[in-house]
Image (cartoon, rainbow, N blue to C red):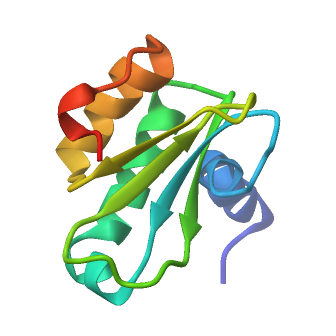
Amino acid sequence: MKTLEELKAIREKNKPQLYFRKENHDATRIFVYMSTAAIDAGARDVLMTFANTLADKNILDAVAIQKGAPSEGNDVKVDVVKPDGETVTYIGITPEKAVRIVDEHIINNNVVAEFKA
């Protein structure tokens, strides 16, 4: 059995992960679509990469959210939605591309044109 201190430490360690998976309309929202084909293509890894990268870089004005979607091929589809409603759709996203989207689009506000749908 874990001590109270150990449980508190686990909660604190995982707190950023939980925050980044909640929907927040005042933040930039990163929707990772989870169709069956997208899951097979690595959508869960992409979602976790977004969440971990946001947490590691201490970005509190963006959230990564799982979203259900009908199957649209075998690629991982991601929408980046700014608080003003501006939406950019990316297709064929991998964990490596997710890090680049955070660095270029979320942090520097530059759309990554080569990944755009």
- Extreme residue toward the top, this view: 108
Picture residue at 30% right of the left edge, 35% below the top: 99
Picture residue at 75% right of the left edge, 28% below the top: 84
Image-quadrant location for residue 27:
top right
Please give left or right for residue 93 compared with residue 13 in the image. Answer: left
Asked whether residue 106 is in view, the answer is: yes
Return the residue nearer the eye: 27 or 73: 73
**Rendering coords of residue 65 (x, y %):** 59, 58
Asked whether residue 9 is in view, the answer is: no
**Rendering coords of residue 88 (x, y %):** 46, 38
Please give left or right for residue 47 compared with residue 72 in the image. Answer: right
Image vertical order of residue 1 relative to residue 33, above or below: below
Picture residue at 27% right of the left edge, 84% below the top: 37
Return the residue nearer the eye: 58 or 117: 117
Q: Quadrant of the N terminus?
A: bottom right
**Rendering coords of residue 106 (x, y %):** 48, 24
The total number of labels drawn is 0
Image vertical order of residue 81 relative to residue 67, above or below: above
Return the residue nearer the eye: 38 or 61: 38
Please give left or right for residue 77 compared with residue 17 in the image. Answer: left
**Rendering coords of residue 103 (x, y %):** 35, 21
- Extreme residue toward the bottom, this view: 36
